[in-house]
Image (cartoon, rainbow, N blue to C red):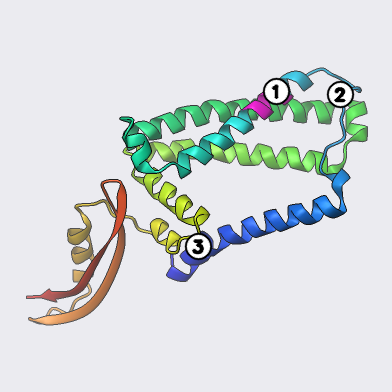
Amino acid sequence: MSEFLNQALFGIYPYVCLAVFLLGSLVRFDREQYTWKSDSSQLLRRGQLRWGSNLFHVGILLLFFGHLFGLLTPHSAYTALGLTPGAKQILAMSSGGVLGAMILAGVLLLLHRRLTVSRIRATSTRMDILILLWILVTVSLGLVSIAFSARHLDGSMMLLLADWAQHIVTFRGGAAAFLTDPVVAAGDVEAAVVEELGEHVDGHARVGVPLGVGVPVGVGDDPGLAEFGAVIQQ
């Protein structure tokens, strides 16, 4: 991924989303307060509503606060409690999977109820159905991502994501650098970088190529920056 695209996606785009969310919410609340809700269908049919609504709302609230505290809690806070990054990763995957399944079940019940009950379908707007479908797709993608998280059970990627999120919400620069591709594990940086770049160095003796290499690496709990000034082939 190019440096510009990485900065645009992970350094600029999050602030665009936050600005649109906050300003859009204020404008809508000021001008169209009664559009903040979906028309109630409880009087038309209560079947599936209690189970679907409770599963969805309990799951989404717990998942929100789980992400909030999981990403924004400093690493030193949970390591002081004896929770390693790997253990935190397993905890996040298991609890997120359970809560995601709750949300998925709730959305499916609400969507089935809204689409199959004729009286509710007749009073539903296209936006009511679109929002449920959008949530269904989002939750499904989140559950699928658990399989990819299982490839990083040491918690290394989780640490990078947490540092990125903490830099974003505290308006610190350089947030996008934590998600630069590729990420090389600590201890393998020098060998990997020199080996890769050595293939592009001319074969003549004593050819020096000035290079400035920056690779985000995990050193303990704090990502650092490995810098190499030049590679000289003997």
The first of marks 2 and 3 along the sequence is 3
Dividing the image into 4 quarters, which one contains the N terminus? bottom left
Q: Residue at x 49, y 38 (%)?
A: 69
> Which span of residues is magenta-colored?
53-58
Q: Which mark is residue 42?
A: 2
Do the numbered discs 2 and 3 sit on residues whose CB atoms are within 8 Å? no
- Can residue 183 be seen from the camera position used here? yes
Q: Could you give the CA–CA distance between mark 2 and mark 3, rounded to whole angstroms?
A: 43 Å
Residue named by callout 1: 54
* Amino acid type, residue under disc 2 in the picture: Gln
Quarter of the view holding residue 62: top right
Dividing the image into 4 quarters, which one contains the C terminus? bottom left
Residue named by callout 3: 11
* Amino acid type, residue under disc 3 in the picture: Gly
Please provide percent x and percent y for residue 106. 68, 26
Residue at disc 3, secondary structure: helix
* Amino acid type, residue under disc 1 in the picture: Asn
Left or right of residue 39, residue 160 in this image: left
Residue at disc 1, secondary structure: helix
Residue at disc 2, secondary structure: loop
Task: Decide whether residue 10 is among the magenta residues.
Answer: no
Quarter of the view holding residue 107: top right
Question: 28 or 190: which is nearer to us?
Answer: 28
- Can residue 144 be seen from the camera position used here? no
Please provide percent x and percent y for residue 63. 57, 33
Please provide percent x and percent y for residue 75. 36, 42
